[in-house]
Image (cartoon, helix red, strand yellow):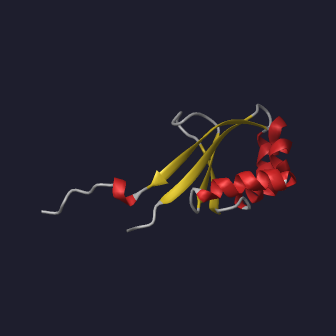
Amino acid sequence: MDEFKIYHVSTANIKPGKSQQAAKWWNEKGKAMFESTPGTRWVKAFAVQFGLGGSGLEIWSEMENYASYDRIDAELNTDPQKYAALGEAQDLIEWGPARVMGDWPESSWSPPEE
């Protein structure tokens, strides 16, 4: 069986006139904070284009497994200061909904070769 992949996708809109400050926050604090969350394999940020999926940014994090969410919840209680960068971004970014996406090999179908 192939390994499945789990992606946590956070959405964000940069507040008007704050794009340079938001980019600085992301480069100096935001990306490192997202990368240091338990169970995170990698983090990438994308600008949503052409009105697909909303506006602003999508931050994709590949997670090791669903247990990563329990580890994040526990860390939020034991080390909230680690996530202080989220509070610092409140004046720059309006956070939107998040979703979990997946890549499950069993859910993919390829027509048989003739």
Please indicate whether residue 66 sits to the left or right of residue 32 in the image: left
Q: Is residue 12 above or below residue 28?
A: above
Residue 87 figure quarter: top right
Please indicate whether residue 11 sits to the left or right of residue 36 in the image: left
Q: Can see residue 24?
A: no
The quarter in which the C terminus is drawn is: bottom left
Q: Residue furthest top?
A: 16
Query: Residue sitting at 84 percent across and 51 percent down?
Result: 80
Query: Residue sitting at 78 percent across and 44 percent down?
Result: 22
Indicate the position of residue 110 as horizontal and vertical percent values: 26, 57
Query: Residue sitting at 40 percent across and 67 percent down?
Result: 2
Q: Can see residue 45?
A: yes
Indicate the position of residue 3 as horizontal and vertical percent values: 45, 66
The quarter in which the N terminus is drawn is: bottom left
Number of numbered tags placed on the structure image: 0
Residue 97 figure quarter: top right
Q: Residue furthest bottom?
A: 1
Q: Nearer the viewer, residue 28 or 6?
A: 6
Query: Residue sitting at 55 percent across and 53 percent down?
Result: 7
Q: Nearer the viewer, residue 32 or 26?
A: 32
Indicate the position of residue 98 as horizontal and vertical percent values: 61, 41
Indicate the position of residue 104 as horizontal and vertical percent values: 42, 57
